Amino acid sequence: MLKTGMSWLAEKIDGHASSAIVYRRAVGDETALSAMLGKTDYEASDESGFVVGAHSVDFIVLAEDLGTPMPVGGDLVTYGGRTYEVMDLIGSGCWQWSNGLPDSDDETIQTSIRIHTRDIGESA
């Protein structure tokens, strides 16, 4: 029952609270997807060793729509006339499950992934 409810909710969010993006893998495959936008704040060291605050622009997509393989650094997202490069967050990787609840079989229900990116400029 919980799995059905989470799937229903993910579909509603995808249909009503998302924007159109194009996901381009480093190997050249391109997929049109719906994504919710998000942001992840993190800290990083600059060239001088100073810790600075930064953030990634995140795109939350249904895992089944993206397919495999999972995102890797160098993949690109086009949205709103801009291009975003998938990047590895220090210690977190370039994506993470965005939701997950245990079901009655003690398996985790995971439907959406959060892809971490950085804005690299206007789309060509």
Image (spheres, rainbow, N blue to C red):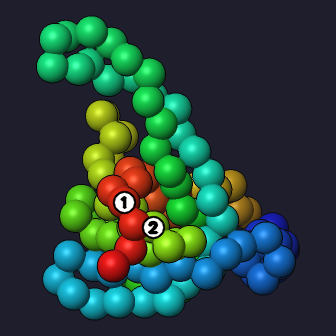
Residue at 32% x, 23% y is: 44
Label 1, residues with CA under 10 Å away: few <14, some 14-19, many ≥20? few
Residue at 46% x, 82% y is: 22
Decide if residue 47 is on the left or right side of residue 91. left
Label number found at residue 82: 2
Residue at 73% x, 63% y is: 104
Decide if residue 47 is on the left or right side of residue 32. left
Residue 95: x percent and y percent?
A: 41, 55
Label 2, residues with CA under 10 Å away: few <14, some 14-19, many ≥20? few
Amino acid type of the residue tagged 1 in the rendering: Gly
Amino acid type of the residue tagged 2 in the rendering: Arg
Residue 112: x percent and y percent?
A: 59, 67
Residue at 27% x, 9% y is: 50
Q: Secondary structure at mark 1?
A: strand
Report the number of numbered marks: 2
Quarter of the view holding residue 34: bottom right
Of mark 2 and mark 1, the one earlier in the sequence is 2
Residue 96: x percent and y percent?
A: 46, 53
Residue 21: x percent and y percent?
A: 53, 78
Q: Would residue 64 be seen by someone viewing this image from the given angle?
A: no
Of 78 and 105, nearer the camera is 78
Answer yes or no: do the residues labelled 2 and 1 have beta carbons within 8 Å? Answer: yes
Tell me the quarter of the image containing the N terminus.
Answer: bottom right
Query: Which residue matches tag 1?
Result: 121
